[in-house]
Structures are given as C-alpha cells and as structure tokens.
Image (cartoon, grey):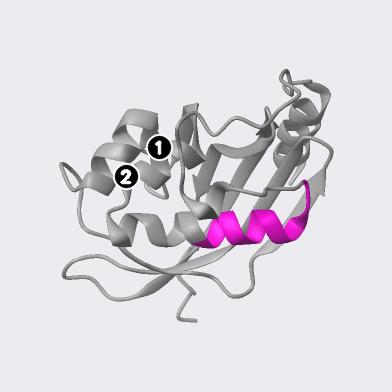
Amino acid sequence: MHALQSIFAALVAVDMDTAPIPSTNGCTAPLLLAQTRDAETIRRLEKAWQTTTFARNAELEQCLLDRGFIEILSDGKIKKFEDELATTKGKKGPFLTRVPSTKTSIFVHGRAAVAYGRINTNLPSAESRAIPFVDYFVWDRGLWHVYFSRQSDRPPKPNW
C-alpha cells in the first residue's frame, strides 16, 4: 500500500493543468464531454474503459488514455499506449471479456484520481476470474486521462 500512496502523492504534486479551456483533441464521444473533478466522472470513465476492449472501441480508448500510458499486467508484462490500442483493435493479444466492476472504489484529490477494485474476466479457453486492478487518472487541460494501470493476480487459496 505504501507504494500506491507514494505514486499518488507524486502525482498530486505535479501541476499538469496548463490550459484554461478543456480540449478533447478531436475526440467527440459524448462520454468525454462535461467532465468534472469528481468521483462520478471517474466512475463513468472507468466503466467505459473497462468495456472499451470488449467493444473494440480504440478511438474512445485513444481519447481516454494518456499518451504516456503504461499498464503492468497480472503476469508482469508491461504494455504501453500503442500496445493497449493494438490489443483493443484486435491486432495482438488474446480476446479478453471484461465485466465492469460494480464495487470500484474511487479517490479524487485535486488533479489526481485513483480507481481500484476487481475486474471479472474471461480469457479464451480459460475459466472466469476476478483480477484486482488499480487505475490512476490525471486531470490535464480539463479532461481526465488514464496514465497508469496495474493488475495483480490473487494467489490461489491453500488446500490445507
């Protein structure tokens, strides 16, 4: 938990809001409009992102992710912005079915936000499982962007 607090504290210290007017950078999805610095906006964006891969909506994902986005998967592999978009477009990686978490916790502080919980997933030819996740958002020029994501496998329960 200490590592999460350190990352979050560093993010809060960075002043990234450089433009007075929100810019969607050409993104016109209704989901991205009327964003505010509150937990409900993060919840709406998080739900959209969790279902984006399933819907193969790379345009929405491109608008939602920060260009410096990094994700650490539960197996330790690292994905960057381009890798995430390619997976969403179906060019590489297995097809992952995500069921949005109904119990995602949200914490917003200034220009930073964190969402954490569990995503129920189905990989091809694998059983369903819940994967713990944490996603970090940064407020930049009037919009939230996901800049870091971490998934971690739960260890199996011992049979003793």
122 and 18: which one is in front? 18
What residue is shown at x 74% (from left), y 24% (from top)? 17
Q: Return the x and y of residue 85 as percentages of the image width and height.
A: 31, 38
Q: In this image, 40 relative to 123: left or right?
A: right
Nearer to us in this view, 139 or 33: 33
Q: Secondary structure at mark 2?
A: helix
User: Which residues make up the magenta segment?
Assistant: 37-47
Q: Is residue 40 magenta?
A: yes
Q: Which residue is mark 2?
A: 58
Q: How many marks?
A: 2
Compared with 110, 114 (above or below) is below
Q: Which amino acid type corresponds to the residue marked 2 in the rendered image? A: Ala
Check whether the beta carbons of the residues at disc 1 and disc 2 lie within 8 A of each other.
yes
Q: Name the residue beneath numbered marker 1.
A: 62
Q: CA distance from mark 1 to mark 2?
A: 6 Å
The residue positioned farthest toward the bottom in the image shown: 160
Q: Which mark is residue 15?
A: none
Q: Residue at x 52, y 43 (%)?
A: 149
The image quadrant of residue 45 is: bottom right
